[in-house]
Amino acid sequence: YANRLVGSENNVWVEFTKLASEPGVLNLGQGFPDFKAPEHVVKSLQQVIASENPFLQQYTRSFGHPRLIQALAKLFSPFLKRNIDAFTEILLSVGAYGSLFCIIQGLVNPGDEASAVIIIEPYFDCYEPMVRTAGGTPVFVPLRPSKKGVISSSGDWKLDPIELESKFSSKTKLIIINTPNNPLGKVFTQQELELIAELCKKFDVVCVADEVYEWMTYPGYKHLKIATLPGMWERTITVGSAGKMFSVTGWKLGWSIGPENLLFGPKLVHQNCVYTCPTPLQEALAVAIETEEERLGAADCYLNSLALELLPKRDRLAQVLESLGMHPVVPEAGYFMLADISKMNIDLPDDGKDEPKDFKFVRWMIREKKLAGIPPSAFFCSEHKIMGKDYVRFCFIKKDSTLAKAADILQNWK
Ligand code: PMP
Ligand code: GLN
């Protein structure tokens, strides 16, 4: 295979999704719901399939189906505090993965000059191979926990402003931020975003804001868009995901929103590798977004209600973990929770592999306890994996009955 792919062979989702699919294993690993998507969203797809309009079964516009980009522009304009031009300022691709790929391939130059990409850790794992295969140089800067060994909040993980600034240079092309963050669930504060924005402006850097979990922000926290800070629209591309927005991860539609000049490169990548995304799914998503947009802020709006539905699940899981001494990092947003496994005195068999403890722990937990999670050191660069090795990530966008079974497994641990 191609030389540029060397080093990207291992993938945590490929390995752990396979292990989690073994019979009898309860899966709190990969992030997806085990309950039904909102009825109107599924219905909109059924109606598209039943439609007499023959064009809904054919190719649509390359950069996004017109009805969908118009629905996205209408939904996001108030949140981005400007009138988004659907036809020039949105690029629709294959999930947020596809969006990130097009952005990174479309903006990063291979080689040493102006190719560094700052990635805040822990990070959604694909950022690193995407940057490397584009020929860029990832530069990592970790959020560090200010509290350890106690129940804590994702907000206790903080950036060191001096360390962050030290990573910026004339070679920095992009910074990728993920707020709310996967796997922590941290919602970046205004102060943190202002600092990042100031550095982007000072060093002429483009900011990629992966905001796929924006709709799942818990009461008391506010998701802020870095693109709305002064001087940042011009240098930010904001990424979103239909899979996360409507609990339909299998739909794999994602979008990039930003100024036309920044989307130019990503569009070239998209037009030559994907060309266009499935028309029926795009039409159905458009209808679903139109429905939600009309009832934004109302109790029955899924974009508002999902976080409230998830809140008791989050609190119940945190309580169970805490009672076992697996101190949870309670998320401010999203549907993942880190649990501290450093106090679990388990004799992990030596499998001869030179890997962080969390990988061995999760494999053991799947095999022996029939419970799957994700090892968080996958979200750190090789040098910083030690920061993730004492945790396991659990996904809690699951039916109460699934979470009750998980609690049973955890409570009967010893
Ligand atoms: N970014 C983050 C932070 C994610 O957790 C995910 C997984 N949903 C993605 C991007 C990719 O999203 P999609 O499934 O839409 O490709
Ligand atoms: N984003 C989801 C997670 O973090 C799924 C990632 C994947 O399947 N590649 O669990």
Image (cartoon, helix red, strand yellow):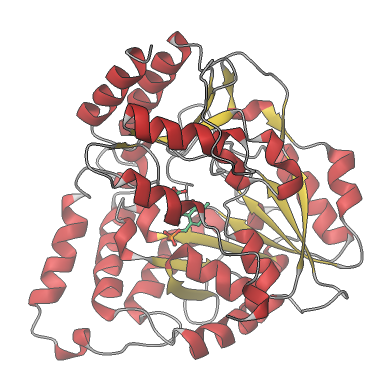
Q: Residue at x 90, y 40 (%)?
A: 162
Quarter of the image where the C terminus is located: top left
Percent position of residue 85, x then y: 51, 76
Q: Which residue is drawn at 53% across and 52% down?
A: 211
Percent position of residue 213, x then y: 47, 47
Residue found at the far top of this picture: 323
Quarter of the image where the N terminus is located: bottom right
Residue 332 visible: no
Percent position of residue 6, x then y: 65, 70
Determine which quarter of the picture holds residue 204. Answer: bottom right
344 and 208: which one is in front? Answer: 344
With respect to residue 67, does 157 lie above or below? above
Q: How many marks?
A: 0
Q: Residue at x 50, y 56 (%)?
A: 78
344 and 194: which one is in front? Answer: 344
Determine which quarter of the picture holds residue 93. Answer: bottom left
Percent position of residue 71, x then y: 36, 68
Q: Which residue is drawn at 39% across and 84% down?
A: 276
Residue 317 visible: yes
